[in-house]
Amino acid sequence: MTDGLNREKMITWEDPKTSSRQTDSMAGLEYLQGILNGRISPPPVAMLIGYRIQDVSEGHVVFEIMPEECHYNPFGTVHGGIISTLLDTAMTASVLSTLPRGRSCSTVEIKLNFVRPVSIKNGVLRCDAEPIHLGRRLATAQGRITDSKGNLCAHGINTCSIFQTDKIVNR
């Protein structure tokens, strides 16, 4: 049974191939700074979910998202996949921020802990992330999501594979 009040959300994004080609000519930090200052379009998933980069420096990133009703699971709280995406994005970006031009990374493993349910009432969620270990082929990073009152909502670690961007196929 529905309340008869359908909701709608319109999203727009730019061709992801444009920004992915730009990464080949930039260091990771430069690429992330380009997204932050609007010179480079955010990836389509950022537009779909609604997260945004708020701060970036070498080895540290901050992403934020305002929970929306469209993020809810059947129980009226933000779906764990939204929280997971925010953490994974920030942790991977923290590794990317340390990589030189021609190198990139992708998550190969992730472990998350959900500490409390999240809803619109939590206000803006902030995700801080930084690398723990940077190797030649693998890196690990950690991230924490806090709500507008500073309460810990979730935390996690991920492992990223580091590779040369010229090895990426189907782009």
Image (cartoon, rainbow, N blue to C red):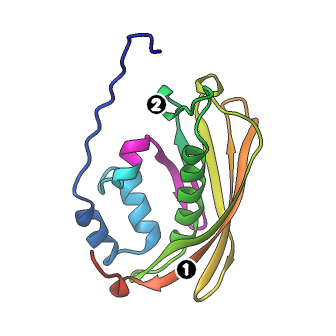
- Give the residue drawn at x 53%, y 51%: 55
Relative side of 142 to 4, left or right: right
Residue 159 at what x, y percent from top left?
64, 73
The residue indicated by pointer 1 is 161
Q: Is residue 146 above or below residue 37?
A: above
Q: Position of residue 13 (x, y in %)?
A: 26, 47
What's under tag 2, amino acid-wise?
A: Cys
User: 24 above or below 57?
Assistant: below
Q: Please state which of residues 13 and 113 is positioned toward the viewer in this rendering.
A: 113
The stretch of residues the image draws in magenta is: 46-62
Crowding near the residue tagged with mark 2, few <14, some 14–19, many ≥20 C-alpha atoms within 10 Å:
few
In the displayed structure, does residue 16 sit left or right of residue 102?
left
* x and y, in percent, of residue 46 in the image: 41, 48
In this rendering, the label closer to the viewer, 2 or 1: 2
Q: Residue at x 32, y 78 (%)?
A: 24
Q: Residue at x 28, y 77 (%)?
A: 170
- Label 2 secondary element: helix
- Under mark 1, the amino acid is Ser
* Label 1 SS: strand
Q: How many marks?
A: 2
Q: Which residue is mark 2?
A: 70
Question: In whole angstroms, how far apart are the C-alphas of marks 2 and 1?
Answer: 32 Å
Q: Nearer the viewer, residue 76 or 124?
A: 76
